[in-house]
Structure formats: C-alpha cells, structure tokens
Image (cartoon, grey):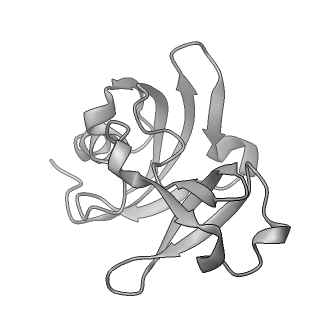
C-alpha cells in the first residue's frame, strides 16, 4: 500500500547531525499537510512517508541530495550598490526576496554590505546539510 498521490498529514521533528532542532510541527501543535509524491516536500521526506501506515513513527537520515541540495556558489550574487533601492536600510542577516526568471520570489539572505555593493546568498539555509527527521503519519 502506498500513500503516493494521497493527501497526508504528518508530525515531524527535524534536527541537524549535532542534534540542533531546526523545525518541529509538534512545537506548532499542527501537523503538516501535503500530497505525497507531488514534489511539495523535499524528496527524502516524501520517500519516507510513501510507505508509512497511519500511527507509524520512523526516523530518517537524509543526505543533502535528498534534502535541500549542496550549497551552490552561483547562488551567491553581489549587486552594485547603485542598483539596490533602499540599500541604506539593509544589513547582514536580513532576508530579502530576489526576482526569478518568471518573476517568482526567491528568498535570499544578505551576507555582506559595503560601499561597492550588497552580496546576497540564495542558497536555502539548510543547503549542504544532512538532516534527520522523526516522522509520525497522523492521517492518510
């Protein structure tokens, strides 16, 4: 029996290899709802839920290729300061949205600001990291 193509609800706790928790649906008190296998979740999470039964719990370790991918240097871009509106209000660590090829927003983080330009990193915060998930399927 497969959950592929079904709307499912799952609770999860996500941790890095050093034990640092980066996300938990338990803490929010609400499971995540998604269509299994539809690409709404990272591939390793989707694969883990595919064959689970309601009420089952499992722990999975995902390599970056099954999660948010490796960090890519081509996603770190410096914009000349004169091309950045409101640059005076920007500082390192700020989250900004870049515009993708189809006008879709691409989240990025400012990593450097100087008189020449502003450098942004559009890599996902968890890119390049192995992730661990405790998953509990609550509805399928």
Q: Is residue 132 above or below residue 26?
A: above
Which quarter of the figure is the C terminus placed in? bottom left
For residue 38, side relative to residue 10 (left or right): left
Q: To which quarter of the image does residue 31 belong?
A: bottom right
Q: Residue furthest left?
A: 1
In the image shown, does 132 or 137 lie closer to the viewer?
132
In the image shown, does 79 or 33 lie closer to the viewer?
79
Residue 85 position, x and y percent, is: 70, 81
Q: Residue furthest bottom?
A: 103
For residue 69, side relative to residue 28 (left or right): left
* Residue drawn where x is 55% and y is 33% of the image: 14
Residue 115 position, x and y percent, is: 73, 58
Residue 105 position, x and y percent, is: 49, 77
In the image shown, does 94 or 51 lie closer to the viewer?
94
* Residue drawn where x is 83% and y is 69% of the image: 88
Q: Residue furthest top?
A: 18
Q: How many marks?
A: 0
Q: Residue furthest right?
A: 89
Residue 104 position, x and y percent, is: 42, 81
Q: To which quarter of the image does residue 3 belong?
A: bottom left
* Residue drawn where x is 40% and y is 63% of the image: 34
* Residue drawn where x is 24% and y is 42% of the image: 47
Q: Is residue 104 above or below residue 107?
A: below
């Amino acid at each position: 029996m497969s959950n592929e193509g079904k709307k499912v609800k799952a609770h999860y706790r996500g941790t890095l290899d050093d034990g640092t928790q980066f996300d938990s649906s338990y803490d929010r008190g609400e499971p995540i709802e998604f269509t299994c296998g539809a690409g709404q979740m990272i591939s390793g999470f989707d694969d883990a839920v595919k064959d689970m039964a309601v009420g089952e719990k499992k722990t999975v370790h995902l390599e970056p290729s099954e999660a948010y991918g490796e960090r890519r240097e081509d996603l770190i871009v410096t914009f000349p300061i004169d091309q950045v509106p409101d640059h005076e209000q920007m500082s390192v660590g700020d989250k900004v949205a870049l515009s993708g090829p189809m006008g879709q927003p691409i989240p990025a983080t400012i990593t450097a600001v100087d008189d020449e330009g502003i450098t942004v990193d559009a890599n996902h915060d968890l890119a390049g990291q192995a992730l661990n998930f405790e998953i509990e399927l609550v509805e399928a």
